[in-house]
Image (cartoon, helix red, strand yellow):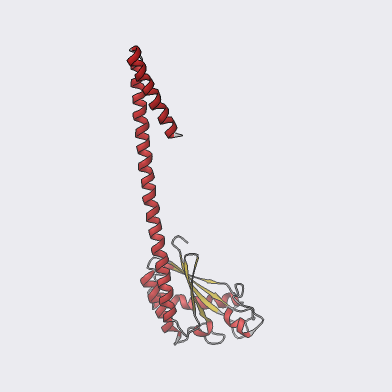
């Protein structure tokens, strides 16, 4: 539409010039057309400059996204190597990094305090998080199977509280020993309500008892 309008102005200006040569008239109209043409050219230059700015902004955003994806993948590989043989899972999902640790790796049966041996694994995770994601938000989430609490019934009302306590133990280790900034980390307790396997078998219940460490995208 803009090009069509510009062509119309040029055509009109050309006709006016021809008419002026033939009849000695429309000098005033010629000046008006030349002014309008100059304004249209200025508008075109502004649009071109704006388009270039948008192109550069898009290229910068694409570069940032590419860097974030590369960092997530690099971190995933590093953690997979560090946690090899522990039963832990590491994956990327929706621009997040998720480290899933089986409860048996972290806690004794029916317990919510960390095993001494588990701390070396948490130290490796904390090192990667602090180095690669210094400004990220980290969620530590606890999960259980659907078996009602027995041993800790006096301590916890339900699996929700137990899952939150286990997540809290990992969170405090990250803050106290891993030096993760407390303002960048929080805990959640999901109890038995986000199973990854069937609770009808012992193997399935074992998979459901876990703590997940999630590195969230910026702004979440």
Query: Viewer-proximal residue, 129 or 183?
Result: 129
At a point 57% along the width and 85% down the height, the residue shown is: 110
Query: Viewer-proximal residue, 48 or 206?
Result: 48
Whether residue 157 is visible: no
Residue 37 location (% of width, % of height)? 36, 28
Image check: 111 left or right of 29?
right
Residue 95 location (% of width, % of height)? 47, 65
Looking at the image, the residue that sits furthest to the top is 23
Determine whether 115 is above or below 35 in the image. below
Query: Viewer-proximal residue, 78 or 134?
Result: 78
Residue 131 location (% of width, % of height)? 36, 72
Image check: 213 left or right of 206?
left
At a point 35% along the width and 12% down the height, the residue shown is: 23
Whether residue 55 is visible: yes
At a point 37% along the width and 68% down the height, the residue shown is: 134
Picture quadrant where residue 22 is located: top left
Determine whether 22 is above or below 136 in the image. above
Count of labels in the image: 0
Determine whether 139 is above or below 205 in the image. above
Residue 100 location (% of width, % of height)? 50, 76
At a point 36% along the width and 47% down the height, the residue shown is: 53
Image check: 216 left or right of 154?
left
Image check: 71 left or right of 146?
left
């Amino acid at each position: 539409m803009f090009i069509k309008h510009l062509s119309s102005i040029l055509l009109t200006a050309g006709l006016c010039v021809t008419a002026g040569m033939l009849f000695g008239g429309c000098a005033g109209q010629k000046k008006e057309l030349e002014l309008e043409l100059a304004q249209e050219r200025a508008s075109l230059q502004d649009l071109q400059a704006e388009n270039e700015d948008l192109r550069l902004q898009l290229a910068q955003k694409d570069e940032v996204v590419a860097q974030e994806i590369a960092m997530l993948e690099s971190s995933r590989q590093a953690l997979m190597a560090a946690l090899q043989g522990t039963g832990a899972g590491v994956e990327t999902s929706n621009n997040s990094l998720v480290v899933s640790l089986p409860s048996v790796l972290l806690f004794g049966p029916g317990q919510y305090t960390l095993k001494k041996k588990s701390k070396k694994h948490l130290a490796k995770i904390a090192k990667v998080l602090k180095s690669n994601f210094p400004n990220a938000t980290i969620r530590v989430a606890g999960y259980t199977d659907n078996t009602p609490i027995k041993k800790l019934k006096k301590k916890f009302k339900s699996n929700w509280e137990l899952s939150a306590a286990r997540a809290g133990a990992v969170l405090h280790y990250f803050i106290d020993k891993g030096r993760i900034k407390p303002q960048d980390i929080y805990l959640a307790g999901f109890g038995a309500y986000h199973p990854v396997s069937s609770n009808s078998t012992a193997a399935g219940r074992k998979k459901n008892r876990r703590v997940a460490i999630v590195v969230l995208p910026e702004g979440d």
